Image (cartoon, rainbow, N blue to C red):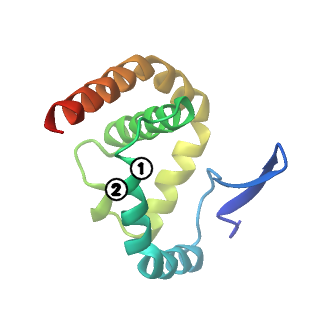
Amino acid sequence: MNKVWKICLKNGQKKRKKMFEVLSIAARKKLARTMKMKGKMIARKRAIAMKKKASPAKLKTRAQKKAVDLLVQKILKGRKRSDLGQAGKEELEKKLKKKTAVIKKIAKKLLPQIKKAESERMAKKGEQE
């Protein structure tokens, strides 16, 4: 259960893909240490990526993240995710893991909104330059 990432081999390329898995306290702390070390590099890469148009796969992952956020809001009923303790976060992840089909459905419905927002973002970026 401590595995956070899985390596996907697709077309001969190695890709890291986040698994939807409940993290133990030790795994959370390990991930926190990794993010502390690589946070600035990730932020820089994100800034560079935001200058380009997002691929359909990226838009799909954005839609899934938004769907997860909507479900989290519904489950927590107004409370913040950051206010939860370790046990609360694990419990929340277990509930979310059971709702993967619902997340996919919501993401599919959100995809047109995400695409529209991306095209608006690119248009606004074009105006600024």
Q: Position of residue 39 (x, y in %)?
A: 41, 73
As shown in the figure, which amino acid type bears the numbered disc 1? Ala
- What residue sits right under mark 2 in the picture? 47
* Residue highlighted by disc 1: 49
- Quarter of the image that includes the N terminus: bottom right
Q: Quadrant of the C terminus?
A: top left
Mark pair 2, 1: CA separation: 5 Å
Residue at left offset 23%, top offset 32%: 126
Seen from this angle, which residue lies furthest front? 129
Residue 114: where, in percent of width, then height? Answer: 37, 26
Image quadrant assignment for residue 69: top left
Relative to 86, say whether 128 is above or below.
above
Tell me the residue at 30%/63% (across/down). Answer: 82
Residue type (three-letter) at the residue carrying disc 2: Ala
Q: Are marks 2 and 1 in contact (CB under 8 Å)?
A: yes
- Residue located 73% across and 58% down the image: 6
Residue nearer the viewer, 54 or 109: 54
